[in-house]
Image (tube, rainbow, N blue to C red):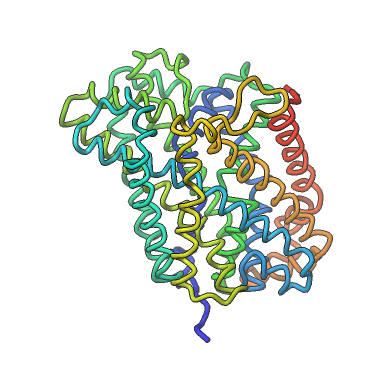
């Protein structure tokens, strides 16, 4: 039987896991969450939540994966608790759902890279027409899925690790180039001030809730991706320090994204940064015009580089999203890895077709469902995101911590963490992990899950 793949060294694992965490949301969502949530005050809250809440969940997922050397479903069976493998199955389902719509948006970003490379700055004004050109954006999405599948088909060390070692440094390099260039734009300092100077009057319960959500969702927790990557990690790996470096990498790239975005916003608005709302609309509809105003050559270079950056960020995430169901197929269903990759990639691409059609091309998928208490319908793409990302991820994180603390038991978790970290036993870190996994994380993630469920699907307003 062919030996199971492994990361060849620690850097490869950290690059791959950080790449899984870094995605489109770090670049188009985080900066504006910061702006709407008190500037630097939000950044501080985000970092605190990353380490206090997310870090213990990350450590737990990696430990379960390394202990069992299995996919998210097989891991629970290998630990002797087959009835709990529904958590892993839920994670596999979340990966399938998220990748099905994420690939569509990644295709948009890749298409913008192509369009701006050829100087088509009008694409922002024609965004609706662009995303409803199903042949064109479907082709961009197909290219993106092919790239994702190619990397995953090459295995752990020869595919995911090798690609991550190239993609992650390149991603950071492109961001630094854009940060430096954006600092030279008129009104750039106003954007930096807006981003970094705390606006404490903006902080309320909703801001705290958003900071919690941003921290958890940005680190790829709750869907088994880190159980899967943990299963390819050496027993000599220090899980605690690796998890810390992954968290720092993700938070650092999100922070860099703000330093890049807000000078662009300030340039575009002539210093009136507060008038712009972030998200896909700003990225796809507003920014191309800003790049055009920089001149035909510079605008083309900076614009193409920006959307290439978005594409790279998306690719590091789609690789991990595909690896979750592939690992399940290989480990549990005993399918050849190459066959599993290409079949699952095709299946997910076809799953994404309704999302592709849900922005006006198909009225059925555009007005797919109207939630209780909602004033207007939700399209299929957003619906899949609400189920896969907003609902299943916090539920998965909640159940994983419950399992680790009260079913597998903390002493077994601690024993696995201690392997590779001899000083763990009796340390402050051990005491904190025990407290967080037993009480803090299940409580907070359970509350996030319930609040999101009631607010999103039943129209219950809490703040």
Does residue 40 lie above or below 70 as drawn?
Answer: above
Image quadrant containing the C terminus: top right
Displayed quadrant of residue 148: bottom left
For the residue pair 265 and 55, the one nearer the viewer reads as 265
Q: Is residue 140 left or right of residue 454?
A: left
Outermost residue, bottom direction?
1
Residue at (32% x, 22% y) in the render: 125
Q: Position of residue 157 (x, y in %)?
A: 43, 71
Displayed quadrant of residue 223: bottom right
Residue at (44% x, 70% y) in the render: 155
Outermost residue, right direction?
406
Residue at (59% x, 27% y) in the render: 41
Number of numbered discs present?
A: 0
Q: Is residue 77 left or right of residue 305?
A: right
Outermost residue, left direction?
297
Q: Is residue 331 left or right of residue 110?
A: right
Q: Position of residue 371 (x, y in %)?
A: 68, 29
Does residue 166 lie above or below 394 as drawn?
Answer: below
Q: Position of residue 417 (x, y in %)?
A: 68, 66
Residue at (68% x, 22% y) in the render: 204
For the residue pair 405 and 47, the one nearer the viewer reads as 405
Does residue 3 lie above or below 79 as drawn?
Answer: below
Q: Position of residue 116 (x, y in %)?
A: 24, 35
Q: Is residue 307 left or right of residue 427?
A: left
């Amino acid at each position: 039987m062919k030996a199971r793949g492994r990361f060849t060294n620690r850097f490869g694992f950290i690059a791959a896991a950080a790449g899984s965490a870094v995605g489109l949301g770090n670049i188009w969502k985080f900066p504006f969450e910061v702006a709407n949530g008190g500037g630097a005050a939000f950044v501080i809250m985000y970092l605190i939540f990353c380490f206090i809440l997310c870090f213990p969940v990350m450590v737990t997922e990696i430990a379960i994966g390394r202990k069992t050397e299995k996919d998210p479903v097989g891991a629970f069976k290998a630990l002797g608790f087959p009835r709990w493998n529904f958590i892993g199955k839920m994670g596999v389902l979340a990966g399938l759902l998220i990748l099905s719509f994420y690939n569509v948006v990644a295709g948009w970003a890749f298409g913008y890279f192509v369009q701006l490379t050829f100087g088509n700055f009008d694409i922002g004004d024609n965004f609706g027409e662009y995303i409803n050109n199903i042949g064109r954006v479907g082709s961009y999405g197909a290219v993106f899925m092919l790239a994702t599948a190619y990397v995953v088909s090459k295995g752990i060390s020869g595919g995911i690790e090798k690609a991550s070692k190239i993609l992650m440094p390149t991603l950071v390099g492109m961001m630094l180039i854009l940060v430096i260039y954006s600092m030279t734009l008129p009104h750039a300092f106003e954007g930096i001030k807006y981003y970094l100077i705390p606006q404490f009057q903006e902080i309320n319960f909703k801001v705290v809730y958003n900071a919690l959500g941003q921290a958890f969702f940005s680190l790829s927790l709750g869907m088994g991706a880190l159980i899967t990557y943990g299963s390819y990690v050496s027993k000599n790996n220090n899980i605690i320090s690796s998890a810390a470096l992954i968290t720092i990498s993700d938070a650092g790239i999100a922070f860099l994204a703000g330093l890049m975005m807000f000078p662009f916003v300030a340039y575009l608005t002539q210093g009136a940064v507060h008038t712009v709302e972030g998200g896909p609309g700003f990225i796809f509809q507003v920014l191309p015009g800003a790049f055009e105003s920089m001149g035909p050559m510079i605008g083309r270079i900076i614009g193409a580089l920006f959307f290439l950056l978005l594409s790279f960020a998306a690719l590091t995430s789609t690789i991990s999203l595909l690896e979750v169901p592939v690992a399940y197929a290989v480990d549990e269903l005993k399918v050849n890895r190459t066959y599993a990759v290409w079949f699952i990639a095709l299946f997910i691409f076809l799953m994404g077709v309704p999302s592709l059609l849900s922005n006006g091309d198909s009225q059925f998928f555009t007005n797919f469902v109207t939630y209780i208490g909602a004033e207007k319908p939700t399209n299929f793409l957003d619906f899949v995101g609400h189920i896969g990302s907003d609902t299943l991820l916090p539920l998965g994180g909640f159940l994983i911590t419950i399992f680790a603390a009260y079913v597998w038991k903390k002493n077994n978790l601690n024993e696995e963490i201690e392997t590779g970290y001899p000083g763990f036993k009796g340390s402050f870190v051990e005491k904190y992990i025990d407290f967080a996994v037993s009480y803090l994380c299940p409580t907070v993630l359970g509350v996030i899950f319930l609040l999101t469920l009631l607010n999103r699907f039943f129209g219950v307003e809490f703040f």
